[in-house]
């Protein structure tokens, strides 16, 4: 019998099955725009680590937005990192599980001036330990932009191993326990991101089939139309509203901590 948790956590298989489909998710651009706005201006003296970079789509956008900034992607999946390297060849990459980091990670100790951790913590049994280990990668005072989902979990969320979704209170508790200072935590994405998430929940198992359609043209025409409509509507999402099902936060490594 296959362990369902092991299957959900098998990112070598997930990226091989539906790598590339994530870019069709209109939520990706929505989160990316928010991340850029909260990171601010970065230049050639800045160094950024994408914690849990996956197949590197965010790093592609970061490279375009910050052409001179040193970028590093860290992820548990070699399949994801191979894809990311092909997309952003001038970035550095390291495969490791931050719940049990490898010694090679020490070369990035107190290295990064900025960080991103987007849609990662919901996959973890111990997000506090993960963030405690990640802290060592950043200089004191370094800002880290974090995104996690709020609201209920869909069948697709369960398929890719979401342990939990967060409330602002629960997320703040994770940050506090990890020894990170919180600048802000915002509920974002109302009303259209929330509506999109409800649509995903209603479609159930069919969303998994959509994700496995590696090329946009392989998706059903109706799905492509819906995604295109949401991509336009997402431009009108509210940056902060109680009904938002996307949490966006910025935390800092304490000075002297």
Image (tube, helix red, strand yellow):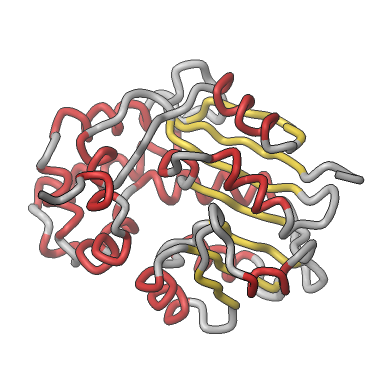
**Residue lying at 39% horizontally and 68% vertically, measured from the top left:** 80
Q: Is residue 215 above or below residue 51?
A: below
Residue 152 found in image quarter: top left
> Does 163 appear above or below 173?
below
Q: Measuring 26% from the left and 49% from the top, which residue is drawn there?
A: 8
Q: How many marks?
A: 0
- x and y percentages locating residue 146 in the rendered image: 59, 43
Q: Which residue is the extreme one toward the top? A: 242
Q: Quadrant of the C terminus?
A: top right
Residue 19 at x, y = what percent? 28, 65
On the question of residue 228 being in view, the answer is no
Residue 5 in picture, x, y percent from top left = 27, 45
Nearer to the camera, 199 or 221: 199
Q: Residue at x 59, y 77 (%)?
A: 91
Q: Is residue 246 left or right of residue 197?
A: right
x 9%, y 52%: residue: 221
Rendering quarter of residue 249: top right
Residue 77 occupies which quadrant of the picture?
bottom left
Evaluate whether residue 12 shows in this view: yes
Out of 200 and 55, give the one closest to the viewer.
Answer: 55
- Residue at the extreme right: 256
Q: Is residue 125 left or right of residue 215?
A: right
């Amino acid at each position: 019998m296959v362990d369902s948790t092991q299957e959900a956590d098998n990112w070598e298989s997930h990226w091989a099955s539906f790598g590339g489909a994530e870019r069709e998710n209109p939520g990706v651009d929505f989160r990316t725009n928010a991340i850029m706005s909260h990171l601010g201006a970065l230049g050639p003296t800045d160094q950024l680590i994408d914690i849990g970079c996956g197949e590197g789509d965010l790093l592609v956008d970061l490279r375009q937005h910050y052409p001179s900034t040193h970028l590093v992607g860290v992820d548990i999946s070699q399949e994801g990192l191979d894809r990311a390297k092909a997309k952003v060849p001038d970035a550095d990459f390291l495969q490791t599980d931050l719940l049990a980091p490898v010694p090679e990670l020490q070369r990035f100790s107190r290295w990064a001036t900025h960080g991103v951790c987007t849609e990662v913590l919901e996959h973890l049994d111990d997000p506090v330990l993960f963030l405690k280990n990640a802290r060592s990668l950043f200089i004191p005072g370094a800002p880290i932009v974090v995104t996690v989902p709020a609201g209920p979990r869909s069948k697709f969320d369960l398929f890719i191993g979401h342990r939990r979704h967060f409330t602002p209170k629960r997320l703040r508790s994770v940050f506090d326990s990890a020894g990170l200072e919180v600048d802000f935590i915002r509920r974002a994405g109302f009303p259209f991101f929330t509506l999109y998430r409800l649509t995903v929940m209603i479609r159930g198992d069919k969303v998994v089939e959509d994700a496995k359609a590696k090329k946009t043209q392989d998706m059903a025409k109706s799905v492509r139309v819906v995604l295109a409509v949401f991509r336009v509507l997402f431009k009108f999402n509210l940056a902060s509203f109680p009904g938002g099902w996307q949490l966006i936060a910025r935390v800092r490594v304490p000075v002297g901590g």
